[in-house]
Image: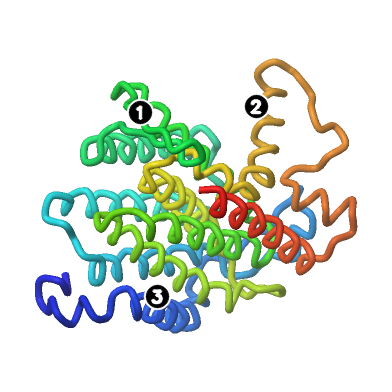
Amino acid sequence: MLYYLFPQFALKINPMFSGLISFIVTAILIGSLMKKLPADQGREFAVNGALSKGKARGCGIIFISVYVVLSLLFVPVIPTARWETMIYLALTFAACLEGFLDDASKVPWGELKKGLIDLVICVATAFTFYMYNGSSVRLALFDVSFELPAVVFIILATLLLWASINVVNCTDGVDGLCGSLTILSCAGFLLILMGTDSASVPSIINCVIMIGAIAAYLLYNCSPSKVLMGDAGSRAIGLFLGLAALKTGSPLAFIPICLIFIIDGGLGLIKVALLRTVKLKILKNTRTPIHDHVRKNKGWSDTQTVARFVIAGAFVVVLYLLFI
């Protein structure tokens, strides 16, 4: 929007100040509105789950709203992709709103209901991406590109987005963990996008704005936390990270850049899926998500868990970036 009203001013502030503005606005709004958020009901089976009971939950509705509004203000909209940008922001907010309504509900939504809504959002996102970007896929490690059939690409992109939403959602269980890993992943995608063509500028600034918003959220979520992002934050972040991977042109970059999300949240999803479908029991002596295992079985504190997971993730991200 600022690019149409004040183009010279907008060009100067992007992306230098967009992240700073995102940080300041988010910090102020969370501090002002946290008491109006629904209270967490505690997590029956999670390690230290009772400690979250009564805390403000659903804070994602605040920082995702800031992300959407500031993206409308500061992200340069390429004329041919104007509707693409608007659709992504609408779908990201839809994922956030879905999560917030669940956070605010006295009776938690069922897995089937949330899964179907996630599916609709992911299909819409994958289809939109295909319509504006095509189905070319690049394997960055091998510097090889190829085209996939449209239907195959949309299906695989949908699976990537759905998996991203769910692994991020499952990782959100320790103060500061999901937010810290989100900043790390955004930074990884940001560095990749900075090495691509000028068409990636909107995605670059999106990452900067998201980093600023999440950093402000961490002011209140670091251990011991005052607020929790809830599904309102984790589901929208999952969609954002999956889309960021697609925007790099190398969707498989999601694996190294978000590896800790995949290990921490994904192993539990695989464990449950195998048990329910083929009655196969794996990881019998391992609690999932993994952050519960290391805290319960290994005696790690919340701070140790966050620090060690982020360090491990940073090592993988740097290694991947060096290879490509």
Residue, x 76% and y 69% (percent of image)?
303
Distance of label 1 from label 3 (alpha carbons): 35 Å
Mark with earlier residue (3, 2): 3
User: What amino acid does circle 2 point to?
Assistant: Ala
Mark with earlier residue (1, 3): 3
Residue, x 45% and y 36% (percent of image)?
139
Sort mark 1 into few (<14), some (14-19) or many (20+) by Cα contacts within 10 Å. Answer: few
User: What amino acid does circle 1 point to?
Assistant: Phe
Tell which tag, 3 or 2, sits nearer the viewer: 3
Residue 206 image-quadrant placement: bottom left
Q: Is residue 298 left or right of residue 94?
A: right
- Residue that label 1 marks: 146
- Residue that label 2 marks: 273
Mark with earlier residue (1, 2): 1
| Image quadrant occupied by the N terminus | bottom left
Asked if residue 112 is positioned above or below residue 63 in the image, the reply reads above
User: What amino acid does circle 3 point to?
Assistant: Gly
Distance of label 3 from label 2 (alpha carbons): 39 Å
Residue, x 27% and y 80% (percent of image)?
13
Distance of label 1 from label 2 (alpha carbons): 32 Å
